[in-house]
Image (spheres, coloured by chain):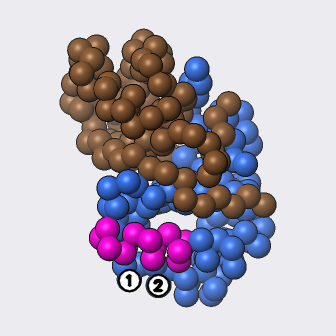
Chain colours: A blue, B brown
């Protein structure tokens, strides 16, 4: 189970994919496969959570890595690149790295 | 502390704000104030987490509500509207409601 906390020593990747609703489930499946086959075995991987919007138009990967360097190193991995090519054929990705700036829970 | 789980009985709001880096901190402050003063007192509020991207260009609110109806009802609240007007003056918001489709933790 993933936890969100201002004090956790992780960096957060939020990758927002814009997709045609008819391709949303296929995109979720591709992201799950990429996570299971490649990402989770990379050094510094903490967690990944694939979210599907009810309106079919977005998929969000909310992921945590131990460091910015660990995340950036994935782009040098050929297996990552081949998964990304498949994903980018059906979706536009907007990813940024984040810190949790403020947390409010009831 | 917020937890992300496929089995939690919540709906997830992910609101992605595009902002000029010079306005990012002001946007974070406005979102924190709106959460503390209004959102957390609304029925069905579970949690909200404000994330600031390292590149200054995005702010993401990752929030959980008990139901879709609880979230949608906030738009009828005049206090919510006045906070939103201030926020939309400096940022573009792209929000969708999501379900957690898959979770992978190492």
Question: Number of labelled discs?
Answer: 2
Which residue is under mark 1?
Answer: A89
Badges 1 and 2: C-beta atoms under 8 Å apart? yes
> From the viewer's perspective, is B5 left or right of B90?
right
Q: Quadrant of residue B17?
A: top left
Q: Which of the labelled discs sits on residue B20, or is there none?
A: none
Quick check: B93 above or below A27? above
Image: magenta residue range: A20-31
Q: Residue at x 32, y 24 (%)?
A: B74
Give the quadrant of the C terminus of chain B: bottom right
How dense is the environment of label 2, judged by Cα within 10 Å: few (below 14), some, or many (20 and up)? few
Instruction: Label 1: state its secondary structure.
Output: loop
Indicate yes or no whether the magenta region holds residue A25.
yes
Which residue is under mark 2?
Answer: A86
> Disc 1 to disc 2, how far (Cα)?
5 Å
Whether residue B84 can be seen here: no
Q: Position of residue B52 (x, y in %)?
A: 49, 40
Label 1 chain ID: A
Task: Name the dominant secondary structure of the magenta segment.
Answer: helix
Quick check: A92 above or below A85? above
Indicate yes or no whether the magenta region holds residue B102.
no
Q: Position of residue A19 (x, y in %)?
A: 34, 68
Quick check: A83 above or below A104? below
| Residues at marks 1 and 2 on the same chain | yes
């Amino acid at each position: 189970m993933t936890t969100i906390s201002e004090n956790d020593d992780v960096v957060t990747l939020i990758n927002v994919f814009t997709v045609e609703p008819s391709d949303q489930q296929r995109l979720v499946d591709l992201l799950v496969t990429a996570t299971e086959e490649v990402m989770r075995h990379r050094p510094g991987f903490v967690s990944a959570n694939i979210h599907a919007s009810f309106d079919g138009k977005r998929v969000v990967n909310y992921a945590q890595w131990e460091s910015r360097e660990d995340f950036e190193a994935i782009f040098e991995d050929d297996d990552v690149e081949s998964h990304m090519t498949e994903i980018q054929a059906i979706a536009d990705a907007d990813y940024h790295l984040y810190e949790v700036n403020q947390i409010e829970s009831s």
